[in-house]
Image: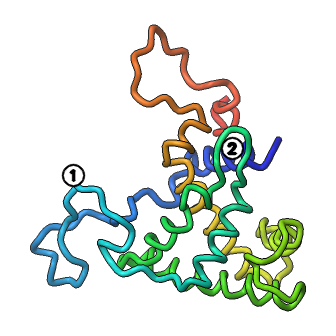
Amino acid sequence: MDRRESMQWMLAAAAAGGPAWTSAAVGPTRTRRDAHAGIGTDPDLVKTYRAGELWPLTFTAVERRCAAALCALIIPADERSPSAADLQVHVFIDEWVSAPYPRHVKDKAMIRQGLAWLDGESRRRFEHDFAGASVEQQRAICDEICWAEKAAPERAAQATFFARFRDLTGGGFYTTPAGMADLGFAGNVPLERFDGPPAEVIRLVGLA
């Protein structure tokens, strides 16, 4: 099973157990009478917003470069689709952590600290930042934090960061047209018959 297929199964399992996050980057619905709470009014839902229009973005140029490299490492380009970085998923993550809602604010601190750690660790080991490292060097760092249960105790915070960043990368990638095509998602199309979910999915969610 390749890295991309593993990501698809991980996201399916996460969805089966309850979504880790379900709101769009614009956050939960609020009415105009809530404006005094400091978050503002509902966005115009028929308008397409560019990153940074709803609220100022957070990442510095260095952080965005590091985030792009990590996105590309988590979901690299292959014969089926571009990489997560090619699809600007790191910009989506910047938009996400810049939102003023409590979960997003919590993610902002975690993500920025994690990106700083990646750059610092890469400089310590390889004498250049994470984005400037080779893919093999990037993997050497991330292999130590990509599974929380296998990470060293002193790397617990970094493993938590990586898990969250991976979730955001997968969510951002697989909600783009290219990501949906990679999944084989056809959208709402008429079917002559529907035989239910595949047996593999039934087993995965523990209903077999």
On the rendered structure, is 69 left or right of 94?
A: right
Indicate the position of residue 101 as horizontal and vertical percent values. Answer: 36, 76
**SS of the residue at dot 1?**
loop
Residue type for callout 1: Val
Question: Dot 1 corresponds to which residue?
Answer: 46
Decide: few, some or many residues near mark 1? Use Cα within 10 Å; few <14, some 14-19, many ≥20: few
Q: Residue at x 60, y 82 (%)?
A: 63
Residue found 42% across the figure and 79% down from its top: 57
| Distance CA(mark 1)–CA(mark 2) | 33 Å
Does residue 116 sit above or below 80 in this rendering? below
- The picture quadrant where one finds residue 9 is top right
**Quadrant in the rendering for residue 143:** bottom right
- Find residue 32 and report its horizontal and vertical position in percent: 11, 71
Q: How is the image coloured?
A: rainbow
Image coordinates of residue 33 in percent, x first then y, are: 10, 74
On screen, residue 103 versus residue 15, left or right, reads: left
Quarter of the image for residue 131 reads bottom right
Give the quadrant of the N terminus. top right
Residue 26 tag number: none
* Vertical arrangement, residue 151 with respect to residue 196, above or below: below
| Circle 2 residue | 9
